[in-house]
Amino acid sequence: MRSVKVSENISWVGAIDWNLRDFHGFELLNGTTYNAYLVRGEMGWALVDTVKAPFVPELLARVASVIDPAEVGTIVVNHVEPDHNGGLRDVMAAMPNARVVASPSGVRGVAEYHDGLEIEAVKEGDVIDLGGRTLTFLPLPMVHWPDSMATYCPEERVLMSNDAFGQHLASEDRFADEVGVELALEELRVYYANILMPLGTQIAKTLEKIAATGWAVDVIAPSHGVGWRGDDVAVVV
């Protein structure tokens, strides 16, 4: 299994769940993906999110197509739900030197799912320096859990947006322009209607918050489905 580049120094190393047909009580027609991203710096590597527990071997195989997993020095937990980080403990075993970071609520949430793991809290504006590449964090509370946050790499102009801008769409392609923008947008609408619409006011505030950062974003890399790049970023933001 191979990784897929989403930018020069960030690769998708997640997993594809072709067979998933039920998610939080609504029917899926096209499966889903559990997206994780490997970020390369001059002084170290970071993994942003892991995957659902049964898919850890797939993630580790994709990481191993780039580097020895033991070289990863940081694991970022954008969201604690099992479809994002159910495999965290097993991934940590393969990356024994990695520090693990999450939002303050995420630290508490990880403890509920994975008792005994050592997790560090990061807050808005904190920066992790990988050497020539940095990661900074934006809390996204109630999009759609209190612990949710996004991770941004300014040097790559990539926003790893967590559940925001995602869809349930299993594909080996990694971008909306590869699967068809209209298909991706329709799945985005379905995802919003079934998962995020009750939080519509908070979602609107989140979009305003992202815009207020002034971040230059060339790629949006969500936790499920395909990403958005180039002109398609403006379509969803």
Image: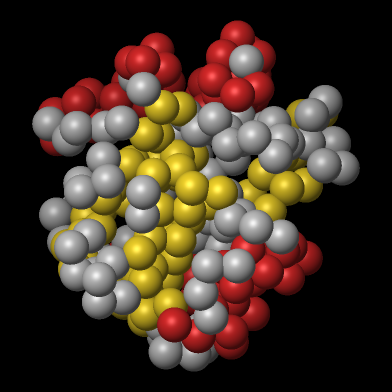
* Residue 80 seen in this snapshot: no
Residue in the foreground of this view, choosing between 139 and 176: 176
Q: What colouring does the structure picture have?
A: secondary structure
Residue for point 33% across, 41% down:
159
Total count of labels: 0
Horizontal relation, residue 224 to residue 24: left or right: left
Q: Quadrant of residue 64?
A: bottom right
Residue for point 82% across, 42% down:
18
**Quarter containing the N terminus:** bottom right
Query: Residue extending furthest top?
Result: 182
Horizontal relation, residue 77 to residue 59: left or right: left
175, above or below 77, in the image: above
55, above or below 223, in the image: below
Horizontal relation, residue 17 to residue 131: left or right: right
Percent across and percent down for residue 89 are 59, 79
Residue for point 50% across, 85% down:
70
* Residue 129 seen in this snapshot: yes
Residue for point 70% across, 39% down:
172
Horizontal relation, residue 202 to residue 32: left or right: left
Percent across and percent down for residue 88 are 57, 72
**Quarter containing the C terminus:** top left
Q: Quadrant of residue 40?
A: bottom left
Percent across and percent down for residue 193 are 60, 18
Percent across and percent down for residue 123 are 21, 60
Q: Quadrant of residue 100?
A: bottom left
